[in-house]
Amino acid sequence: MKLQGIRYEYQSITEQTEREIFDYTLKKVTEYGFSRFFFRTSLRLGNTHLDGAILSNYPNEFITTYENNHYTHKDPLINHCQFSIEPILWDEHVFNKTPDLLKQVQSIGLKYGWSQSVHDAMGAVSILSLGRSHTPLTVDEYNEKAADILWLCNQLHIVMISQFSPAGRAAHPVSRLSIREVEVLKWTAEGKTASDIAMILSLTTRTINFHISSAMQKMGANNKTSAVVIATKSGLL
């Protein structure tokens, strides 16, 4: 499903401690209509993947069982999100090949959910899963909330990687954006498409896409939403 004309929440996580970030995330997740969330980063060092920071209100018993049974390697949500930034809306059918995992998920009252990933240029992947016990997800709900959930996942990725990753990865140096790149990213943050921005700035769509691509490269981002988040956190917008 393609997002068009959806205004991004123009805000960044300003909370500093892990508890403050947890409370902020829970507030947002609740606003989006979910009761449980699980966020985890994965860092790539050469050919090795290392699990990074975790932020979650899943019961500790569930997390322990999940880790002890090595569900990471067969979880269909992770298998999807490791290779795609497209959201995956899940129900019991997603877990057809992993009935034991489905049973564990249902044991904490989760029937419906949403998983979103972020991949950065340094090889780190973050996955945010939101779950609830009632009300299947609809196309209308997806269209209403997709931009906000992607934005939240990007914010968590940046702050958790920089502050709490056990791998201690150094922050990616941010290059200075050109005046035009800043202008284009600001309109992107408002939910405008490349063709919309081209009309506003009296430029060609090809030129707008060039500026977006250039900004993404400077920000070390693999999508325009990530570029907007990184630029905002860096004080460039």
Image: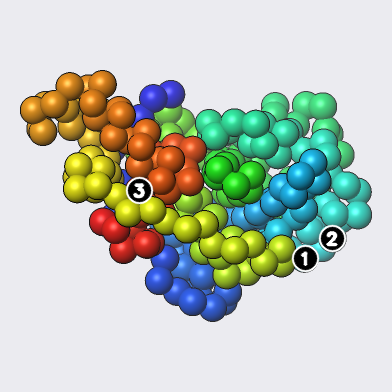
Please report contact status of discs 1 and 3: CB closer than 8 Å, yes or no: no
Position of 89 with respect to 96 (left or right) is left
Residue at numbered disc 2: 64
Please report contact status of discs 3 and 2: CB closer than 8 Å, yes or no: no
Q: Is residue 87 visible?
A: yes
Rounded to the nearest angstrom, the CA distance separating label 2 from label 1 is: 6 Å
Q: Would you place residue 191 above or below residue 167 in this image? A: above
Q: Would you place residue 137 above or below residue 172 in this image? A: above
Q: Residue furthest right?
A: 68
| Front label number (1 vs 3) | 3
Q: Would you place residue 205 above or below residue 136 in this image? A: above
Position of 7 with respect to 21 (left or right) is left
Within 10 Å of the Cα at label 3, are there few (<14), some (14-19), or many (20+) other Cα atoms?
A: many
Residue located 47% across and 58% down the image: 173
Mark 2: which secondary structure? Answer: helix
Q: How many numbered callouts?
A: 3
Q: Position of residue 42 (x, y in %)?
A: 69, 51
Residue located 10% across and 33% down the image: 201
Quadrant of image for the N terminus? top left
Residue at numbered disc 3: 228
Q: Would you place residue 95 above or below residue 134 in this image? A: above
Residue at numbered disc 1: 60
Q: Position of residue 23 (x, y in %)?
A: 51, 71
- Which of these two is toward me, 226 or 122? 122
| Badge 2 amino acid | Thr
Q: Is residue 131 visible?
A: no
| Badge 3 amino acid | Val
Mark 3: which secondary structure? Answer: helix
* Sequence-first disc among 1 and 3: 1
Within 10 Å of the Cα at label 1, are there few (<14), some (14-19), or many (20+) other Cα atoms?
A: few
The quarter holding residue 134 reads top right
* Label disc, if present, on residue 175 of the rendered structure: none
